């Protein structure tokens, strides 16, 4: 199994087994303590944890043990042990990220945040303290009772930790910014095992860097975020046939450019699979209120969906319902690109080229056993960028010069024997899409724009930090808080 996954691993993972033979054993050292829960292979909780990944490719990587801290102090104790050896490690929240080695590991310790699962609402400050071990449906199930919500994941089964540190795109992002913009404080265990609070007044550079900086600065053990009043919402799905593609591409262009209401949000996905003869478009719709004003989503409903199950419901119900979109039991992979929204006169050509590029690659994979391919078009209108700046900014540092779309592609399949084929296809997609964007910009059919990648949707081969204009700032902060490169060299994730 290790050989099959070798092309996905990082140097620190490749050397892990050899190092364990000569170095101090983190699992053994922590196991000598009585206060930190530890589980090894064959234990039911170990097996359950490994099953709790969205991708079986991550679950197939077997850690030497799983450590379950229940406080920042216990995380700090583990970090002190890790500082005494050179063993690679990973930290896992909800297991959403499919990149092997980001939150999964073979032959090294895995730190699970499962028991860092606090959800505490403070009505006086209108904030919520949230542990990284939660999924978003668990968070909202608690908050629903108090009539508030936190800006969080659009699918309930997304974990809090990695989502927040990647920026976090929410149904509420045009209303309140990225999820990371809503953080008031981070509780962080640093590389030297000290515990600090990062906020606008305490360690403000670290506070900013954590909003999109991933795991380069420390282990976040709690997020204190703004709570927003929350009543019933409206949401659900529209389904369309593949022959409605031109109209749908026109509609999403118009919706993003003429964004009708900050309380409205969509995810437009197209799906293709030989299994079940799937070839369709499935939209996720949301309105932050019991009923959207007339006309809000007419640009889509006027096309004539073959299914419409949108209705008024509680927000936590929608998040739990959206879990149908999680396809477990398969190897799952993901990649992304960011594009400006084309002007109306070039919209059909530009968006059609992206769609055809995805479809041509995806059709070539239909014979892969258990294959399902999907592409999502996610609006990032100017008003989201403005709101993010109003809320204090983040590492993405979007300007409001253009409207954007985040393109996300994911492929699911049954066997690791097809890893190389899928890897080649993903690279072909994101590199080819980038070429299309540059070509359309060169001939004037797309505006020039700053186009960072969205970390939460990024493929491990992509240069996330290389696309950020804040990369120099991010590097300076890393060097201040992790001068020895503890997180840079010992664990996975996008690195500077």
Image (cartoon, rainbow, N blue to C red):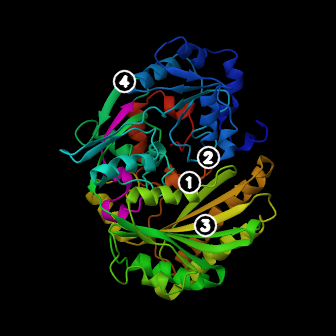
- Residue range (magenta): 169-189
Count of marks, rendered view: 4
Q: Residues within 10 Å of mark 4 (few under 14, many from 20)?
A: some
- Which residue occupies 17% across, 44% down? 124
Q: Which residue is mark 4?
A: 194
204 versus 34 height, above or below: below
Comes first in the chain, label 2 or label 4: 2
Asked if the residues shown at circle 4 and circle 1 are in contact, with their CB atoms under 8 angstroms apart, the answer is no
Q: Which residue is mark 3?
A: 375
Which x, y percent locates residue 321?
50, 59
Q: Nearer the viewer, residue 55 or 388?
A: 55
Asked whether, in this view, residue 153 is left or right of residue 29, the answer is left
Query: Residue 99: which numbered mark, if any?
Result: 2
40 versus 203 height, above or below: above
Comes first in the chain, label 4 or label 1: 4
| Farthest-out residue, left | 124
From this viewpoint, is residue 462 visible? yes
From this viewpoint, is residue 380 visible? no
Mark 3 to mark 1: distance in Å? 13 Å
Mark 4 to mark 1: distance in Å? 30 Å
Comes first in the chain, label 3 or label 1: 3
Query: Residue 458: which numbered mark, if any?
Result: 1
Asked if the residues shown at circle 2 and circle 4 are in contact, with their CB atoms under 8 angstroms apart, the answer is no
127 versus 91 height, above or below: below
Asked if the residues shown at circle 1 and circle 2 are in contact, with their CB atoms under 8 angstroms apart, the answer is yes
């Amino acid at each position: 199994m290790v050989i099959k996954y070798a092309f996905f691993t990082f140097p620190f993972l490749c050397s892990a087994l050899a190092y364990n033979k000569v170095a101090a054993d983190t699992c053994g050292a922590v196991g000598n303590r009585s206060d930190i829960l530890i589980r090894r292979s064959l234990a039911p909780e170990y097996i359950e944890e490994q099953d709790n990944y969205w991708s079986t490719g991550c679950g197939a990587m077997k850690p030497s043990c799983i450590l379950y801290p229940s406080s920042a102090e216990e995380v700090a104790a583990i970090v002190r042990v890790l500082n005494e050896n050179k063993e690679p490690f990973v930290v896992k929240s909800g297991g959403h990220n499919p990149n092997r080695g980001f939150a999964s590991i073979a032959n090294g310790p895995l730190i699970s945040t499962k028991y860092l699962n606090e959800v505490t609402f403070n009505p006086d400050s209108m904030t919520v303290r949230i542990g990284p071990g939660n999924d978003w449906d668990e968070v909202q199930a608690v908050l629903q009772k108090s009539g508030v919500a936190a800006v969080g994941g659009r699918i309930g089964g997304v974990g809090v930790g990695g989502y927040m540190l990647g920026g976090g795109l929410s149904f509420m992002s045009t209303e309140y910014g990225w999820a990371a913009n809503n953080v008031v404080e981070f509780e962080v265990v640093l590389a030297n095992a000290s515990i600090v609070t990062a906020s606008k007044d305490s360690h403000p550079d670290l506070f900013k860097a954590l909003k999109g900086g991933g795991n380069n600065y420390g282990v976040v053990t709690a997020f204190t975020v703004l709570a927003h009043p929350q009543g019933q919402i409206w949401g659900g799905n529209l389904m369309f046939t593949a022959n409605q593609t031109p109209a749908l591409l026109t509609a999403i262009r118009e919706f993003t450019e003429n964004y009708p209401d900050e309380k409205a949000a969509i995810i437009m996905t197209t799906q293709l699979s030989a299994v079940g003869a799937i070839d369709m478009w499935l939209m996720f719709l949301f309105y932050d209120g019991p009923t959207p004003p007339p006309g809000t989503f007419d640009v889509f409903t006027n096309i004539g969906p073959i299914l419409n199950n949108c209705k008024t419901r509680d927000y936590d119900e929608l998040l739990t319902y959206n879990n149908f979109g999680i396809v477990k039991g398969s190897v799952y992979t993901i990649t992304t690109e960011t594009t400006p929204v084309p002007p109306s006169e070039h919209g059909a050509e530009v968006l059609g080229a992206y769609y055809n590029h995805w479809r041509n690659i995806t059709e070539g994979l239909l014979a892969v056993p258990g294959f399902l391919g999907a592409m999502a078009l996610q609006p990032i209108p100017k008003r989201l960028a403005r709101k993010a700046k109003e809320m204090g900014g983040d590492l993405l540092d979007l300007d409001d010069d253009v409207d954007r779309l985040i393109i996300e592609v994911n492929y699911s399949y049954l066997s690791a024997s097809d890893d190389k084929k899928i890897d080649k296809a993903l690279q072909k997609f994101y590199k080819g899409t980038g070429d299309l964007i540059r070509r359309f910009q060169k001939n004037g059919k797309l505006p020039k724009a700053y186009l960072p990648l969205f970390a939460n949707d990024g493929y491990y081969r992509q240069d996330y930090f290389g696309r950020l204009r804040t990369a120099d700032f991010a590097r300076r902060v890393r060097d201040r808080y992790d001068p020895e490169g503890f997180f840079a060299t010992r664990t996975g994730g996008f690195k500077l």
